[in-house]
Structure formats: C-alpha cells, structure tokens
Image (spheres, helix red, strand yellow):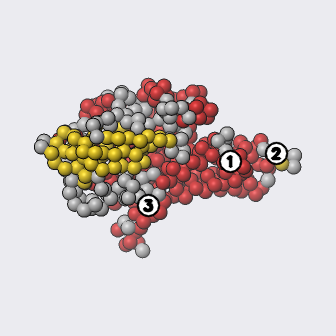
Amino acid sequence: MDFNYTPEQQQFRDALRRFIDKDYGFEHRKSIIHSGAGVSEQAWNTLVELGMTALPVPEEQGGFNGSAVDMLVVMQELGRGLVVEPYFATVLGAQFLKLAGGQESLLEQVATGELKLAAAIGEKQARHDLHDIHTSAGRDGDGYVISGAKSVVIHGGQAGKLIVSARTGGGQRDTDGISLFVVDADAQGITRRDYRTLDGQRAADIAFSNVRVPATALLGTEGAGWKILDAASDYGVALLCAEAVGAMDALNAATLEYLKTRQQFGVPIGKFQALQHRMAEMFMQAEQARSMATLAAVKVSSTDEDERRRSVSGAKIRIGQAARFVGQQAVQLHGGMGVTDELPAAHLFKRLTMIELTLGDTDHHLARFAARPAFREAA
C-alpha cells in the first residue's frame, strides 16, 4: 500500500498546518475555549476559506468529493492543533446526508460553511449502543412528532441543523424501526443545554418535546435508518482515529522538547537512558496507531459491511490503547507540570481521553470486533 500523500493532500495539510501554527497557537486556543461562545467564528471562516468544509462534499454540490483518506490528512492536523471548532460534527452530519441521498441543498450549504451540523444520536441509557433508542417519532398528518432526549451531542449548541435518530417502530434496542431526521436546531419544542467538555470542546444535552417536522425531514426510508446510522458512525470513528494520531504526534513532540530542556543533576533529563526508552515506546505506539488509522480510512468506505466494521473497530481498539499509553507516559515524563493547564500536554491528554470515549470506547469496540463472524471462525 502506498502511504505517501498525493500533491493535493500535501497542499491541504500544509495550508492547514500554516494556519494552525500562525493563527491558532496554544494561548490563542485557550482564549477561545474560555470565551463565552467556546468557539471562534473567525477560525471557522478560515477553515471554510481553506476548503475544509467543501472537502468531503460531492462535486455536484460544490465540494471536492474527498475520500476518507483525504479527510485523514485534515483530521490529523486538526488533532495536532487541538482545534475546537465544530468541524468534526459538521462533516459527520454531512456523511449522514450523503448516505441518505436527496439532501443536495443542505450539502451545498455545508460546502460553503453556511451550515453547521451535529449528530444527535446518543442517549443517556444507551452508553455506546447507538441502536438503544428511546426517542420516538410518531406520524402526525403528513409529518412526524419527535419526543425524547439526546445526551452529549458534540457541538449540538453550535449547529444549525441536527441529525436525529428516533424510533418509529420496534423495541428500544432493535436495529429495525430506527428512523433518521434532519431537524432545525431552533425548532419549537427543542431545548439545548450547551456546555464545555473536559477537553475544551463543546457539547449539548438536547430535549425534544413534541417537535413537529415535515415528512421531508426524514432521511432515507422510515424504519430502515440503522444501516445509515451504523455506516456514518463508523465514518466518524475513522475521523476520530486520525485526529488521535495528530494529537499523539503533538504530545510526543511536546514531551521530547520538555526532556531536552528540563534539567536535573546539571544535565537535560532526556539524556537518562530509562527516559529515552520510554520515549521510544511512545513513538512506536504512535506509529502503530497511524497504520491502523490509515487502514480504517481505507476500509470505512468498503461495500463489505463486515470488513468495514472489523477494520474500524480494530483501529479504535488499537488507537485507544496507544492514546492511553502515550498520554499517561507524557504526563509522567512532564512531572507535576503535565497535569496543569499551562502546558499543552494536559490538553492533548484530555482530548485523547475524550476521543477514546466517543462513538464507542475500547471495550465496546473490542466486543464488537470479537462478535464479527471472521473472528469467531478464526477462533
């Protein structure tokens, strides 16, 4: 497999890296997350100008029709810079629209940066099982009425429209009977509680009280939304894996620089062989994670659903393990400073921790991987 970037991918990476290094430094990011909005509209507009919002959108809707591998390049840089703007939430929402079809107008708005999206697909009782849905959508004339609640909706408070999973049939944990809707975030009956998460990102708990939506709000076929939900969430996992690799790269670089400058007994602590061994292991973990993130990006678009699920879960498992190792080692090597807000190390470790918990933690994906037919046959 060729792991080299194409010239176009290199251009996207270099442009995004220049922006982050020049205009999105660590101190500037801290000022953003502690602001009232928690995000920067100026930074968002820069991402739009760089073509990031248009990258995953089909050419017919004004985008570049970028693949998951193209997105891997972008997400690694966003992870390296700890960017907190609602990019991941928006492109994940766009994936729902692409898979469902018939949402050309909304995709055009995503490409231009006019529309921000959020996926309201998780519920309090469900933990990581996205098919565990209590939120209901009942027929009401020529439309639907949605009632229920969604928890920890990433950038749900910043979105103009929400992708909502609701049950139109079946039992609470059935995969049949799930429907998907695109809903105005300010629709009557919606209450959003926006808050800052551990890693400086934004999330919202959203309540739906008899929210009326037209029949055109339905994505795909009524009661058959699980395949779209499952595929889109796997796409989101692949993006998170790439972001984690970027964050690990930044954390390794910050730790190495600290070892070169922090002195003990008159010499930099990086000269101590025991610490060199630990640093080497951190780099090895990051390289293994990079390989798995690339595999997930390649396989997430596979028409073989079992292959897609196996590859994505395998990547999330390995990257979750690597993120924990790299984060814990980095904090220890920084000493007490590693847990303070004054250094990037703590912020990077917090983001890696949240990535591990988003769209299924390591244990969840380990169980999902073990349930694959190929795994049972091999055993």
- 132 left or right of 330? left
Q: Position of residue 118 (x, y in %)?
A: 37, 41
Amino acid type, label 1: Gly
Q: Position of residue 90 (x, y in %)?
A: 38, 38
Q: Is residue 268 above or below residue 22?
A: below
- 37 left or right of 310? right
Query: Which residue occupies 47% across, 63% down?
Result: 363
**Tag 2's secondary structure?**
strand
The answer to whether residue 227 of the structure is visible from this angle is: no
Query: Which residue occupies 30% across, 50% down?
Result: 148
Query: Which residue occupies 77% across, 48% down?
Result: 270
Q: Nearer the viewer, residue 38 or 272?
A: 38
Mark 3 and mark 2: Cα distance apart in space: 41 Å
Q: Which residue is mark 1?
A: 338
- 152 left or right of 161? right
CB contact under 8 Å: marks 2 and 1: no
Mark 2 and mark 1: Cα distance apart in space: 16 Å
Q: Residue furthest bottom?
A: 379
Q: Which mark is residue 374?
A: none
Q: Which residue is mark 2?
A: 263
Amino acid type, label 2: Gln
Q: Is residue 368 above or below residue 251?
A: below
Q: Which residue is mark 3?
A: 365
Tag in front: 1 or 3: 1
Callout 2: 10 Å neighbours few (<14), some, many (20+)? few
Amino acid type, label 3: His
| Quadrant of residue 365 within the rendered picture | bottom left
Q: Residue furthest left?
A: 141
Tag in front: 2 or 1: 1
**Tag 1's secondary structure?**
helix
**Tag 3's secondary structure?**
helix
CB contact under 8 Å: marks 3 and 2: no
